[in-house]
Structures are given as C-alpha cells and as structure tokens.
Amino acid sequence: MPRLVFAVNFKAYETAFNEKSLEIAREASKASSRYSNVRVILIVPAAVVSKVLQIYDDIYIEHADPVDYGAYTGYLPAKAAKLLGVRGILVNHSEHKMIYRDVAKVVETASRDGIETMACADTPGEAAGLAYLRPTYIAIEPPELIGTGVSVSKARPEVITEGVKAVKAVADIPVLAGAGITYREDVIRAVQLGASGILLASAVMKAADPGKALSEFVDALSSAA
C-alpha cells in the first residue's frame, strides 16, 4: 500500500521563521523514521529552506511563479526549486490562488526538472480540473474552514468523498484533505473517507508544542493506514 502523506504548511506564521521551525524539522525527521507507512512533508517559506534542509530534506516550497530566470523582481521561478534543493512545490493554495494556465506552467516546469507538485483545490470540481495537469498530489481544502478548528472531515465530508471520486475519474493521483483538521479523529476520519493524506497548518504551527503536535498527527495517520 502506498504511504499516506502528512504535509505541514508553515505559511508565514512566526514559528516558520524562529527556532520552532527547527524543532518541527527535527520531529519530522524522527517521525519519518518511526512510521514507515507515512511520508512527512514540510512546506516551508523559501527564505528558510537552507536552514530546514540541514535537519530534514523532505520539504516543499510554499509557492513558485510561472516565470523563467530573468528580470522578475519579487518572483520565485519554478525552475529555482531544483537549485534550492527542495523536493516539491505547493501551488494554488487558497491564500495564493493562480489562474489555471499559470498552475499548468508551474506543474510542467517542475515535472521537467524532477520536482514534485501539490496542487490545491477549493472544491471537487476544481480538483478534477487540476487532475488534468498531472501534479504529484492534489489537496482539497474548503477555504471557509481553513484555520477554524472545524474539520472538513466532520463538517463537509462530501468534499473529500466527491473530490476523491472526481480526481480518480481523470487520473490516479493521491488526494489529500485539509481545512480545520484539529484532532486525531479528524485525521482518521479523512482517511476513512478516501483521502490519501492530510494537509494542515495551524494545528501544528500554532500549537504550544509544534513538534509534539506533529508527532501525534503522524501517529494518528499511521494508525489509519
């Protein structure tokens, strides 16, 4: 059975930039070794890639732009991901939406360079559209539930079931669930509904002990495999 995925989006929380980021990376390394049936991915700001890579190497950057190298002040070319040493790119998160052709360019560029992509969708319909681009993963997160503590697997379970069905009708791409994931049972229920993993942020990044929170979530996901 393919490994389930536990992905933590650091976003721009203070813990993404201070010493907590390294604590999370250390715990991710331990959890990755401890649970062979779960892949732990840390999705980090480009500014902290080099720091986190010293401890843990299964990391994505939070965004990349559909531009090549050149005079693009403030942009991060998708081609730079390979030089940064990351394994993947998160693209089209609800907090950083992109038009379809730009998502397509990022996914295509990354694929040519052997870089993975995790494309985010707000709805099952959007997920199906993204499936035609063949990203490595698709993550479905209803934006209205993000950061609320109200889990998609409880409040909107149909988003997961319908999203998985819509994606699988196009391509065999693992679908991750996210938005409001807060408790162990939220993780287990999402997998029962057909998700191949979890994408979350605040439940780890805003926890009193982020490393412990990560470990507990990975343990929950492992038990659901």
Image (cartoon, helix red, strand yellow):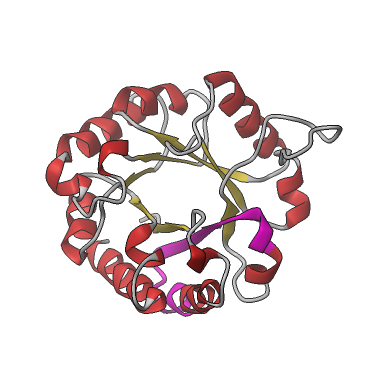
The spot of residue 204 in percent (x, y) is 37, 66
| Residue at the far front in the pictured view | 14
Above or below: residue 132 compared with residue 116:
above
Above or below: residue 101 compared with residue 70:
above
Q: Is residue 56 left or right of residue 38?
A: right
> Where, quadrant-wise, is the N terminus in this rendering?
bottom left
Residue stretch rendered in magenta on the structure:
30-49
Q: Is residue 171 left or right of residue 149?
A: right
Q: Is residue 40 magenta?
A: yes
Which residue lies at the image location 37% right of the left edge and 66% below the top edge? Answer: 206
Which residue lies at the image location 34% right of the left edge and 69% below the top edge? Answer: 218
Q: Is residue 38 magenta?
A: yes
> Which corner quadrant of the image does residue 200 belong to?
bottom left
Above or below: residue 137 compared with residue 205:
above
> Which corner quadrant of the image does residue 104 belong to?
top right
Which residue lies at the image location 47% right of the left edge and 80% below the top edge? Answer: 30
How many marks on residues? 0
Q: Is residue 80 visible?
A: yes
> Where, quadrant-wise, is the C terminus in this rendering?
bottom left
Q: Nearer the viewer, residue 176 or 4?
A: 176
The spot of residue 161 in percent (x, y) is 21, 36
Q: Nearer the viewer, residue 38 or 151?
A: 151
Q: Is residue 142 visible?
A: no
| Residue at the far left in the pictured view | 154
Q: Is residue 16 left or right of residue 79?
A: left
Which residue lies at the image location 60% right of the left edge and 33% below the top edge? Answer: 107
The spot of residue 13 in percent (x, y) is 48, 60
The spot of residue 70 in percent (x, y) is 86, 33
Q: Is residue 82 left or right of residue 22?
A: right
